[in-house]
Amino acid sequence: MTPDQILFIVTALISTLAAVMVVSRRNMVHAALFLVLTLFGVAVAFVLLEAPFLAVVQVLVYIGAIAILMIFAVMLTRNVTDDSGDPFNKNARVGGLAALFVFSLLVVMFGGWSQFTAYPQAGDTSGSIVQLGVALTAADGYVIAFEVASMLLLGALVGAIFVVWPRQNENE
Amino acid sequence: MVPISWYLIWAAALFSIGLFGVLSRKNAVAILMGVELMLNAVNINLVAFWRYLDVRAIAGQAFAVMVFAVAAAEVAVGLALVISVYRRRQTVAADEIDLLKW
Amino acid sequence: MTDPLALLGDWLLNLLAQLNLPPGLRQVILYLLGVSVIATVALVITIFNTWLERKIAARIQDRLGPNRVGPWGLLQPIADAIKMLTKEDTTPAAADKVAYNIAPILAVVSVLLIWAVIPFTSQWFGTQLNVAVLYIAAVGSFGVLAVLMAGWSSNNKYALLGAFRAVSQLISYEVPLFLSLLIPVLLARSMDISVIVEKQATLLEMYVVAAPLAALLFFISSVAEVGRTPFDLLEAESEIVAGYHIEYSGFKFGMFQAGEFMHTFTIAALTALLFLGGWQGPGVAQAPILGLFYFMGKSFAVYFVTMWMRSTLPRIRIDHMQALNWKILVPIALTLLMLTPIVDYFTKDLGVLFSAFGGALTLSWRFAALLLTNILVTLAAIEAVRRNAKRNFVERSRFPERPVARPPREEAA
């Protein structure tokens, strides 16, 4: 076992266990904190995959914004169903079976792929940030997707504010 | 070095756990958390394919960035909807929000 | 001149080679040593800074400050630390134990992680990361998480309310902070802090010349991010007992406190690196070790300003805090972020405006144009604020002038 294999196994185990806790904990704040752990594990995986930019953005976006927003939402919607009672709905068994089915399907499908056990290609990844920046703004790259994403974010910003804005005539 | 299969299986596991969360949790916020897990699994795959198959083609990373943007937008609007529903109906249990059901 | 740290590193490598350790493990041990050295340096500076801060605040407020323990009270922080460590370590019965205990660690770690990318001299740095500026922004988010965890897990109304106040302030001020952080990145065309410092080679090439407004925005919003006066609403002792760490005592409280002090010095160091040229100074090319003194000197100069602010300014009101951020800082930062690349694009090839003292003072057209842009944006912002200010003085002038108590002068005479 090489050091990066050990690192991968530890990361994958911790974040998979944390993901199981996310979907099974009754206490929603705990679930959100475990979500942070899972997302941090994914960030570590990005570092192992030599994509430091994405790792940092993962921490910034997911832990710095999304997880905090989740915890806020949990605290603002405190309810009796949060801390007691069954956290699962009546489809839980079917859901579990479906998840297992999808997992085995994915593994079987990937297993049949010719490059399933491929090792990383020898290549210099140090310039990937510049490459990514150019690709996101070049006309023959992803500039349209980039602009659409920015419009989507703007729309989401306006939409979220509009949805939760307290209206005068509704406070009966 | 780690073969790509490890990343793929790990991502598949995260995806399935997320799917289970989406399908079977009562709390709407928990459902959104499940969606986040699934999106992250997709991101791991995208970046793993970029690193293992073709480092010169940046598509994997570029699409991971798009997924970040979509995830951020989805969470902002989703949580706004959850809070809005909670204000009107005092519940965030997804199976109690059934006005459109017939 | 040989680099003492490099000599030390070679000596350590030889020592480890004699122990017949595998090369991978040798590297790991060296990294661990480096990490602990940098973390210790940051913490020792913090201990010294608490003394410095109390002494300077005392002088500003016409007091003496600590002067009992050791010469000039120099051992006061150690006495304080011993007092803090010997206090009872309490945990509320209804607290969420795990989150309660992780939160203070996270608060310190989020600041310590920043020191990993800070270059002390051109050769001494933890790691050279090509996304360093983004990394600094990212690890800061652990601090927000720590505050939220501390407030929630204490199971105390005041702690939770304090945490909500704190998080709303931290998240709001992250916006102008990140936007102003992008301006040195734009000017240096790199997110690597070492490169940003290298580009600020002479006095007039420091980014505070090209982007003084961005430096000011960065400084203000990072002071707000630390939660120091005038932005200390997070732990406003006179309003919400102590904010999110009300339930913490002893060592854990000490960790929050240490994290806050360390964060203050860290933002001073970051301002010095990003806008004041870090380790750059005369003679650095010949003797890189001089850079450490320049860097520390600049950092302490900025740190002095934060201490000065803390001991003179009153606390800002909470709605003013939010209004300052969203109505003033964010629009200015966005305008600046739009104008800087445009001006930069059209002036980058124009050459030198003037040069004096054999190139020691060289102002390029690019920096002059950027400086002009900054000044114009500042003037426009001041005008906009002045026009849209609530005109309280007009309202007040409607009332007749109230009689003012005056000493009866005529009668006495």
Image: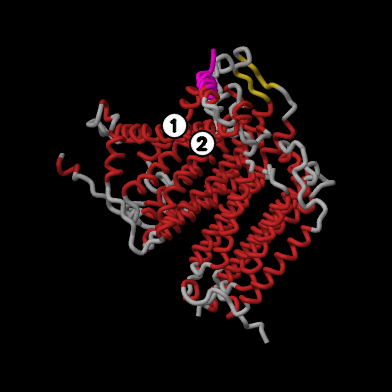
Q: Give the range drawn in magenta.
A: C1-14
Residue bearing the label numbered 1 = C41
Task: Tell me which corner region of the image, top left, top right, bottom left or bottom right, holds residue A111.
Answer: bottom right
Q: Is residue C206 or residue B53 the one in the foreground?
A: B53
Give how far across and how far down residue C238 sits, in percent. Answer: 32, 53
Q: Is residue C296 left or right of residue C359?
A: left
The numbered mark at residue C115 is 2
In the current view of this chain or complex, which residue is farthest to the right? A140
Q: Is residue C168 or residue C122 the one in the foreground?
A: C122
Q: Quadrant of the C terminus of chain C?
A: top left
Up/down of C282 relative to B28, above or below: above
The residue type indicated by label 2 comes to Trp
Q: Quadrant of the N terminus of chain C?
A: top right
Colour scheme of the rendered structure: secondary structure
Would you say residue C3 sits in the magenta stretch? yes
Give how far across and how far down residue A172 sits, in percent. Answer: 50, 80
Q: Is residue A83 or residue A130 the one in the foreground?
A: A83
The residue type indicated by label 1 comes to Val
